[in-house]
Image (cartoon, helix red, strand yellow):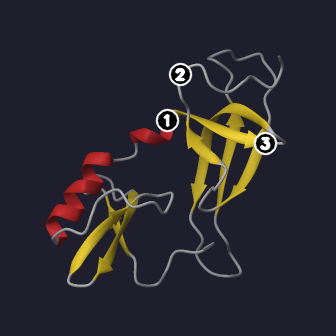
Amino acid sequence: MSTVPDAWIPHRRSGDGELIGWIRPEGERFVAVSLFGADVSPALDWVEAEEALEEVGLSWLADVWELTHEGRALRVRIVEVSPGESETRPGRVLVKTDDFGAIDVPYELHALPWPPPELRPARPGSGASPWG
């Protein structure tokens, strides 16, 4: 999957209209789906699926993630998430190696397909910096 399926219904935050995920029909119920295309709820009623997305929100995008690249686990941060709009505009996720809060260190950018199969939430102590 490189584009958002037509059956998925966008769900936007009520305060600012920011896309926070989709609601996917499943039979007569609905599943909340994150910006990474992953289910964040079981099949629920419509309102419950909306509430599940609101609860998850977007704060998880600021977390540290682990990218497996060329056999190494790297600590990365998400820079951009662009779900695919069509076959001619496939989605991508842009990440950069974690700079550990320093402003003067080198970093690497990695463009990944959407949804990003090589990206996982970081575990404590996992992942390396690209410079050592």
Mark 3, residue position: 69
Q: Amino acid at mark 1?
A: Ala
- Residue 96 position by quadrant: top right
- Residue 22 position by quadrant: bottom left
Q: Does the CB distance between marks 1 and 2 fall below 8 Å?
A: no
Q: Separation of disc 1 and disc 2 at Cα?
A: 15 Å
Q: Does residue 130 lie above or below 1 as drawn?
A: above
122 left or right, relative to 46: right
State the mark number for residue 62: 1
Quadrant where the N terminus sits is: bottom right
Q: Does residue 94 lie above or below 34 as drawn?
A: above
In the rendered structure, which disc, 1 or 3, sits on the residue that comes first in sequence?
Answer: 1
Q: Does the CB distance between marks 3 and 2 fall below 8 Å?
A: no
Mark 2, residue position: 124
Quadrant where the C terminus sits is: top right
In the rendered structure, which disc, 1 or 2, sits on the residue that comes first in sequence?
Answer: 1
Q: Residue at x 59, y 19 (%)?
A: 125
- x and y percentages locating residue 68 in the rendered image: 72, 41
Q: Nearer the viewer, mark 1 or mark 3?
A: 3
Q: Residue at x 27, y 63 (%)?
A: 42
132 left or right, relative to 53: right
